[in-house]
Amino acid sequence: MPSEDDFITRMMGFGLTEREARSYLYLLEHGPKTPSSLAKALHTYREDVHRTLTALIKKGAAYISLAFPTMYTAVELDIVLESVLKKQESELREMERRKRELERLSRQQSFRPSEEVSTFEVLKDVKQIVSVTAVAMNSVEQEFLWVAPKELLLVASRFGLRDVVKALIERGGQTRAITDITTSMMPLAREFLDVGENLRHFDGYRGLYFGVFDRQRCISAVNIEISRISLEEPATMVYIDDPVYATYLTSTFELLWKQAIPAQKRIEELLERG
């Protein structure tokens, strides 16, 4: 039988945070609950539960009753998964549309010589993602920016990308990263802090995951439902050698960076909570 952690990991691959996945699973197993009873069952604060339940409603994974007391109910799992799949398909179509638009703008504005062809490569498993990312990072001269979920940080740690980050920093480059640091992620966050990574926490972030190399090339996620850390594990990211899209992602990163807090501060907050 799949464990609770297996279920949570898979739901995180479908766009839920760890906190959201745990709350959703509890509602599935135990039925409608008030925020207070859910907070007590999950050993957390009522304010945290309110934020989590609001996020679940926005993602179509829960709904609220109109009666008193207010009760929250989990949407059936198959409905949630179907909705997420449709959203991911829509995002992939949007990426294709952006690619065509960027190519058109590039031709019109002469962002690069006309004989130079932009790279657009779909990476279909962890092995390809690690390989392309490592090569791109080894060629970085100034800066690598990335926004990553727990799964990609685990991949980076397990398959040598953390060492590539360290090497970049040692040769004078800069690297900044944003992730959602939970209690279970603290050891992993410390690993990257120890090699000099400038890491920040963005609470509950489940937006676009991406990396930008020297503001010229970028890699962005289409589907990263990684249920086990293996090179053969399927995952989909797009690698693009296009400074226009890289500039857009860099601007997105800087907005997130301003809202995020230093990783060490987040770790201290989690330790204080016990």
Image (cartoon, rainbow, N blue to C red):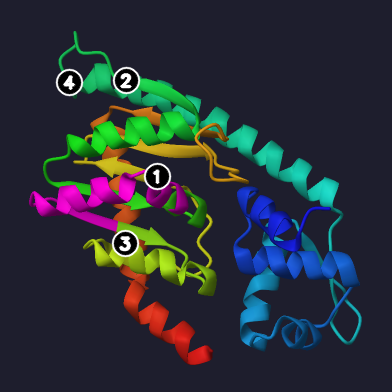
Crowdedness near tag 2: few (<14), some (14–19) or many (≥20) residues, C-alpha within 10 Å: few
- Residues 117 and 132: in front is 132
Closer to viewer: mark 3 or mark 2: 3
Quick check: 69 left or right of 87? Answer: right
Gap between marks 1 and 2 measured at Cα: 16 Å
Q: Callout 3, which amino acid?
A: Phe
| Mark sitting earlier along the chain (1/4) | 4
From the image, tell me which residue sits under label 2.
119
Quick check: 175 left or right of 100? Answer: left
149 within the magenta span: no
Gap between marks 4 and 2 measured at Cα: 12 Å
Which stretch did the figure color magenta? Answer: 154-176
State the image quarter where residue 113 is shown. top left
Outermost residue on the top side: it is: 115
Q: With respect to residue 256, does 36 lie above or below? A: below
Q: Callout 2, which amino acid?
A: Thr
From the image, tell me which residue sits under label 4.
112
Crowdedness near tag 4: few (<14), some (14–19) or many (≥20) residues, C-alpha within 10 Å: few
Q: Residue at x 58, y 44 (%)?
A: 226
| Mark sitting earlier along the chain (3/1) | 3
Residue 78 place in picture, x, y as percent: 84, 46
Closer to viewer: mark 1 or mark 4: 1
From the image, tell me which residue sits under label 1.
210
State the image quarter where residue 130 is shown. top left
Secondary structure of the residue carrying numbered label 1: strand
Gap between marks 3 and 2 measured at Cα: 29 Å
- Residues 108 and 154: in front is 154
Q: Callout 1, which amino acid?
A: Phe
From the image, tell me which residue sits under label 3.
192
| Mark sitting earlier along the chain (3/4) | 4
